[in-house]
Image (cartoon, grey):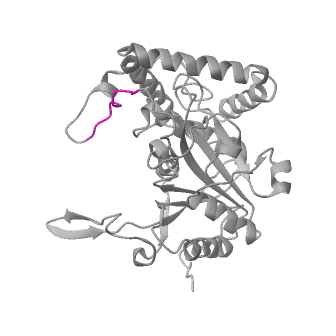
Amino acid sequence: MIELEGVPELVDPVMVAAFEGWNDAGDAASAAVAHLDKEWKGEVFAALDAEDYYDFQVNRPTVWLDGGVRKITWPTTRLSVVRVGGDKPRDLVLVRGIEPSMRWRSFCNELLGFAHELGVELVVILGALLGDTPHTRPVPVSGVTSDADLARTMDLEETKYEGPTGIVGILQEACTHAGVPAVSLWAAVPHYVSQPPNPKATLALLNRLEDLIDLRIPLGELAEDSRAWQLGVDQLAAEDSEVAEYVQSLEEARDTAELPEASGEAIAREFERYLRRRDGGGPSGGPAGHATDGGGDTASYLRDTPSERTRPPRPQRPDPGTETPGGTGDTSSDSGDDSSEDSPE
């Protein structure tokens, strides 16, 4: 039985979920939900029982000190709610956790129980995969669904993917069978610089989510972080002529493939986002907050600190056939900017 006594009645709630692991290349998806939680000061109201879904030898608990008292944080999935005001108020239910080790059907059923009790109208699941996409171009984000009607009304691709899947694909199918509208947004991360963080991919997911649910999302410092990330990778790639040549080949392939689509809907979507941010007094870093805007100071980004490595490791020329959505195991070397059929749902 799910108890939700502490949660207020929500307004047109949308559930936004992301899971660390196989579906989260560059930590882009989980970082997007973490950003929403931070910017809108989400309040955690539930956590799934870690004993039910996680292998602690795979996802180990951590021990920490709180005023001299040792405490344990268990790997799990937590749900929080954020209240979004404005002209069009809409609340979000944020689901952030780790891909479960076991009992995926029970895991999805428990999340759907929360969605039902809270009156969730739409579930959006964020994911990120490795692909043959250059870091110098806008991050491709594909929106896919298993619902043919939803695909038509929200201008999405109806998924035709076949192959190994992660919790993102399982949860989307569980929503479909339960009659809950569900969409997956996949960002393609360059496989030659796959190590987290990837703020540019995180920003791309948030921009696409903003368009999907018609809600202005405060981007904070993400636009500046994205520019710094790209400049940092530019510098590292320039140190290796083979990597620079490979990136150039990806750029040419990408530009050739997208040339017919360089206008029309894409330009209209960017203009609509610009107007939305201008009317709402958009955040610093430009009206659209895109990672491809110029400028940015890379000094702090490239500096390694004792507590956190923020400089991306040296890019390496890829070995075709070794890329995966999250960077482990084997799969095909499909391009990340192809259609949603390549998304590993």
* Residue 51 position (above or below residue 247): below
Q: Nearer the viewer, residue 197 or 212?
A: 197
Q: Is residue 212 left or right of residue 312?
A: right
Question: Left or right: where does residue 98 sit relative to residue 9?
Answer: left
At horizontal 30% and vertical 66% (from top left) the residue drawn is 61
Residue in the picture at 54% in, 46% down: 331
The answer to whether any part of residue 334 appears in the image is yes
User: Does the magenta segment cover residue 160?
Assistant: no
Query: Which residue does the image show at 43% across and 19% down from the upper left?
Result: 243
Q: Position of residue 194 (x, y in %)?
A: 44, 37
Look at the image and tell me whether residue 82 can be seen. Answer: no
Residue 109 appears at what percent x and percent y?
Answer: 61, 75
Magenta highlight range: 308-316
Quadrant of image for the N terminus: bottom right
Q: Nearer the viewer, residue 106 or 297?
A: 106
Q: Residue furthest bottom?
A: 1
Magenta-drawn stretch, dominant element (helix, strand or loop) = loop
Up the image or down, 2 lies above or below 160; here it is below
**Which residue is at the front of the view, 70 or 244?**
244
